[in-house]
Image: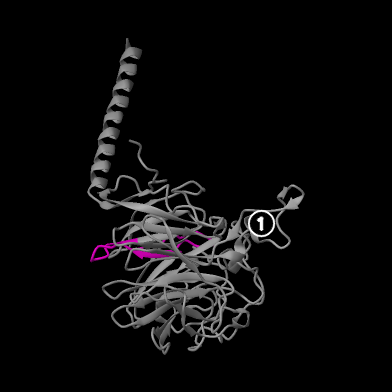
Amino acid sequence: MKRWKIAAGFVGVLAALAVASAIFAKKATVEAAGVQAPRFEVDVMWPKPLPNHWVIGNTIGVSVDDKDHIWIIHRQASLEAMENYAVANPPGPKRQAGKIEAECCAPAPPVLEFDEEGNLLHAWGGPGNGYDWPGSNHGITVDYKGNVWIGGNGRNTATPGVEEGGPAQQGKAVDKGKAGRGPTGPAAFHDSMVLKFTQEGKFLMQIGKPSSSKGSNDVENLGLPAKTFVDPKTNELYIADGYGNHRVIVFDADTGKYKRHWGAYGNKPDDTPLGPYNPEAPLAQQFRNPVHCAELSHDNLLYVCDRVNDRIQVFKPDGTFVKEMVIAKNTLGDGSVWDIAFSKDPQQKYIYLADGSNEKVYIILRDTLEILTSFGDGGRQPGQFYAVHSIASDSKGNIFTTETYRGQRVQKFVYKGLAPVTKKDQGVLWPKRG
């Protein structure tokens, strides 16, 4: 009898614990439901297939213009041999009736413009008269006037067509392609310029000259610039500069006249090597390479991606430091803070941050820099990522992402409105059936 009473008591305790656990779980769900964030679903049919047996390589820039056309830039030189058979010399190995033929494939032109339905509208880019095309193009921005800006991170002796920075900068094994190695310092920076074109590909202006960088305090040349942004209020061009230099630099977007520059915390940039990133060390007082993005909000705050330092730093337009946030601080190698885009509500309430190391997109409350939730996972299926590199949003709230290394694609995530946050990490946003 005594044993029976003990057993019954034990069962009662377990039942009470189960009830308490259910209550706490329900309470946590209700509390989480009080926080809302934008909700998305991957469009598995976007974009439509390219014509002419074209394929794209490392896709290292995306921008949305005022017509909600989506622009990407990719690296032709990053394609493998089998992706070039149609243009190979000698031709590819497909044999038919004793002749060597290959119908597929060929590199698409570097710059591609799509409409919202995923139709290819225009394609152009590459070397031409009057300008120096980057050895390794990087980043694309369509400004408020419709001009197209292109940067580059090609070194004079680097392996062409691959992403540089991250693991190569830290001497770690490269998991997603081999980053170019060669001489260090400004002498190695072939891509010391940014280019400005019309949407039809007509050349307008070049700031900087190739192989001419004198380091992070040179006001005439750049040092492997990663990304640009043009402020509609002042017509100033902000450049995340970049893979070689350690700064943000500002020019007049029409004349190319130098305005100002600064490093981390608003300090004067210093090119002294910092050594590998250590998450346990005090926060670095300078940017590491690459300084990967610089995006200005409507309320005049500049958000800078200090990628390998795993942080966003926020500045006033004059370079005054405001605040910072470390994201996934234990991320080594390529770092966690690759690119950001703002939500399209007037207040730009949310930041979407692409993390190409952890293969996800964070949804962040912009005023506090609090992470609300994230989505994505590593892989090659729609909604998954392989080195998600760049991100942009359109007027409808949709998100577009590109992937570098062997990812080689652009994806569309359709905005589905606001929804309660029930998971910190949502995983793959696959469409719901029926």
Left or right of 281? Residue 361 is: left
Q: Residue furthest front?
A: 97
Q: Residue at x 30, y 34 (%)?
A: 21
Q: Position of residue 387 (x, y in %)?
A: 51, 57
Q: Mark 1 = which residue?
A: 85
Q: Which secondary structure class fits the magenta region best?
A: loop
Q: Is residue 58 magenta?
A: no
* Residue 162 in sight here: no
Q: Position of residue 33 (x, y in %)?
A: 24, 46
Q: Position of residue 343 (x, y in %)?
A: 30, 62
The segment highlighted magenta reads 327-351
Q: Position of residue 275 (x, y in %)?
A: 57, 71
Q: Is residue 38 above or below residue 302?
A: above
Query: What SS does tag 1 mark?
Result: helix
Q: Residue at x 37, y 55 (%)?
A: 117
Q: Residue furthest right?
A: 98
**Type of the residue with mark 1:** Tyr
Q: Is residue 334 magenta?
A: yes
Image quadrant assignment for residue 412: bottom left
The quarter of the rendered structure image containing the C terminus is top left
Query: Of 301 and 150, which appears nearest the observer?
Result: 150
